[in-house]
Amino acid sequence: MHELGIVFHMIDTLEEVGRDNGLTSIAKVTLNLGEVSGVLPDYLLDCWRWAADRSDLLRGAELDIEKIDAVTVCNACGRTYATLAHGKTCPHCGSNDTVLLRGNEAEIDTIEGW
C-alpha cells in the first residue's frame, strides 16, 4: 500500500510547487513510472483520485502515467538490454555483473495549471 504514501508525497510536492509559482489550480500531472518500480498504476490512480480531490489546488486534476521501460547495462560487455525480458543475466555475454539504468523511477514530469 505504498501507492498512497507516494500520492501523499506527490501532493505535498505539487502544493509546494503551486505556492512557489502562484498557481491556483492544477489540471494535469504527468508521472514517469518505471516498469520495475513496484508501483501498481491502477492502485496509484485510485489513490490519486481519492487524495487529490481533498486538495483545493488539485481537485479534479488528472494523473497521466507514462511507463518507463526498464533497461540494464552489463558491466562485462558494456551492452544494454531490456530488464524484464532477461533479468539480471546479460543476454549478450551471460554475465551477472549488471546494473539497472532506468525503470525504477517514480518522478513528476510535467504539471499543467494556472
Image (cartoon, helix red, strand yellow):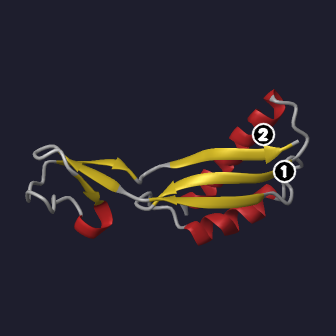
The residue labelled by disc 1 is: 55
Please give the count of numbered marks on the rendered protein. Answer: 2
Cα–Cα gap, marks 2 and 1: 9 Å
Residue in view at x 37 percent, y 57 percent? 70
Q: Residues within 10 Å of mark 2 (few under 14, many from 20)?
A: many
Place of residue 56 in the rendered image (x, y in percent of width and height, measured from the top left):
89, 49
Q: Secondary structure at mark 2?
A: helix
Is residue 98 found left or right of 85 in the rendered image?
left
Residue in view at x 16 percent, y 58 percent? 90
Q: Earlier in the sequence, mark 2 or mark 1?
A: 2
Is residue 112 found left or right of 79 in the rendered image?
right
Q: Residues within 10 Å of mark 1 (few under 14, many from 20)?
A: some
Q: Is residue 112 above or below residue 42?
A: above
Q: Residue furthest bottom?
A: 42
What is the quadrant of the N terminus in the image? bottom right
Q: Quadrant of residue 28?
A: bottom right
Q: Residue 110: give its label.
A: none
Residue in view at x 67 percent, y 50 percent? 8
Q: Is residue 54 above or below residue 23?
A: below
Place of residue 64 in the rendered image (x, y in percent of width and height, measured from the top left):
67, 60
What is the quadrant of the C terminus in the image? top right
Q: Quadrant of residue 75?
A: top left
Foreground residue, 83 or 20? 83
Q: Kindly indicate whether the residue at mark 1 contacts the one at mark 2 (C-beta within 8 angstroms).
A: yes
Place of residue 45 in the rendered image (x, y in percent of width and height, measured from the top left):
66, 66
Is residue 22 found left or right of 62 in the rendered image?
right
Q: Residue 15: give its label.
A: 2
What's under tag 1, amino acid-wise? Answer: Ser
What's under tag 2, amino acid-wise? Answer: Glu
Q: Secondary structure at mark 1?
A: loop
Residue in view at x 28 percent, y 69 percent? 85
